[in-house]
Amino acid sequence: MDRSARLVTARRRSLPLVGLVAAAALVLTGCSAQEGASGGGDAGGRGADDPVAVATTTQLGSVLDQVTTCAGASSATIMGPGDDPHDFSASSRQVAQLATAELVVSNGLGLEAGLRTALDNARADGARLLEVAPAVDPLPFGAHEEDHAAEGHGAHDGHDGHEHEGLDPHFWMDVARMGQAAELIGDELAEATGEQQYADCGTEAAGELEAVDAEVRQILEAIPAERRTLVTDHEAYAYFAAAYGFEVGGVVIPGGSTDAEPSSGEMAALVAQMEREGADALVTGAGGGNKLMQALSAETGGEVPVVEIYEGGIGPEGSGAETYAVAMVLNARTLAEALS
């Protein structure tokens, strides 16, 4: 199988569930067998303080860190916990990092709208850019709305500012696809630097994420089949639903961004849809304090809980979700506790 085909083929080999806790711990520490031998620089002589690669989002930054730490190098992440990738703009120092790194890892598919100019300029200046989402078998964007429009549920008509066509960028909500991303990052870094250890570390990180994916599936198995209909704050959970056996039964803000608000009529239509078709949880991003979701829950008499999970990025220090791997496991546990 050639390299491009291998990169877009889903890594879904089944794993035994025994020892998954140990595997998840490996995700936190990186490839420990190689970390201590490097002395803080990679084989190409890069200084300990110079990132060999830069990622845009915190999710990709977490996985990139796994790969580079394993190889004895360092990386940087442009965004921080709580930053919205849709409108984030880079500082002058971060723009310089984009231009000087061996590799820039971005999500792509329009997610980093605020970074578009900076990324385009970095590419024009000769930077090597890797857009991950297009290479991991992306899903069509807005499939939920198309399905409901076909059924005659027009709860979200009139949002002209949102684009519903194209491919969905929110692939990281499927851990198996993020495993593909780890391997892709490792291979690209190996090509950029000429150092095979990056490809080896990408493969190792992908295996660790396969174990995390299996742990997420095991946790979510506790949720009954009849308790798996979600209403979400925006159109960002299609990958999660497809990978782990959920249905997105409604969306408060259509499109992949959260920078709009539905009208009172649209909210009323969504409440009516929930009453007619049912909903088991109202899912929103952790720390967002989404008043619309609280209002929807109140309309149900509190019977449909608001569940906050880490969707837009990993958590800040002290949150218990400081890496991509532990954030996704925490997401599964939070949902399981709410719906089991």
Image: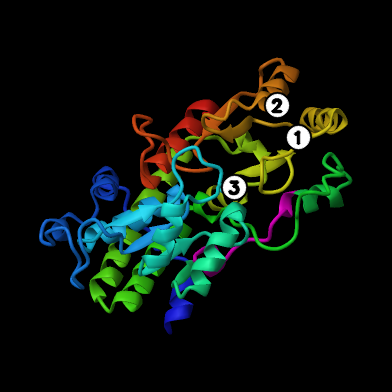
Q: Which residue is mark 2?
A: 292
N-term mark: 2 or 3? 3
Mark 3: amino acid? Ala
Q: Is residue 136 visible?
A: no
Q: For the residues marked 1 and 3, what is the alpha-carbon distance in whole angstroms?
A: 23 Å
Q: For the residues marked 1 and 2, what is the alpha-carbon distance in whole angstroms?
A: 9 Å
Q: Nearer the viewer, residue 323 or 328?
A: 323
Judge from the rendering whether residue 265 lies leftward or rightward of residue 106; answer left or right.
Answer: right
Q: Is residue 238 magenta?
A: no
Task: Please give the name of the residue rendered at 44% of the width and 71% of the height, measured from the top-left corner.
Answer: 127
Q: Please report contact status of discs 1 and 2: CB closer than 8 Å, yes or no.
A: yes
Q: Residue 283 is drawn in which quadrant?
A: top right
Task: Please give the name of the residue rendered at 66% of the width and 62% of the height, measured from the top-left corner.
Answer: 167
Q: Secondary structure at mark 3?
A: helix
Colour convention of the picture: rainbow
Of the two numbered discs 2 and 3 in the rendering, the one whose residue sits closer to the viewer: 2
Q: Looking at the image, is 200 positioned above or below residue 118?
A: below
Of the two numbered discs 1 and 3 in the rendering, the one whose residue sits closer to the viewer: 1
What is the magenta range? Answer: 131-144
Q: Which residue is mark 3?
A: 241
Q: Please report contact status of discs 1 and 3: CB closer than 8 Å, yes or no.
A: no
Q: Residue 301 is drawn in which quadrant?
A: top right
Mark 1: amino acid? Glu
Q: Which residue is mark 1?
A: 261
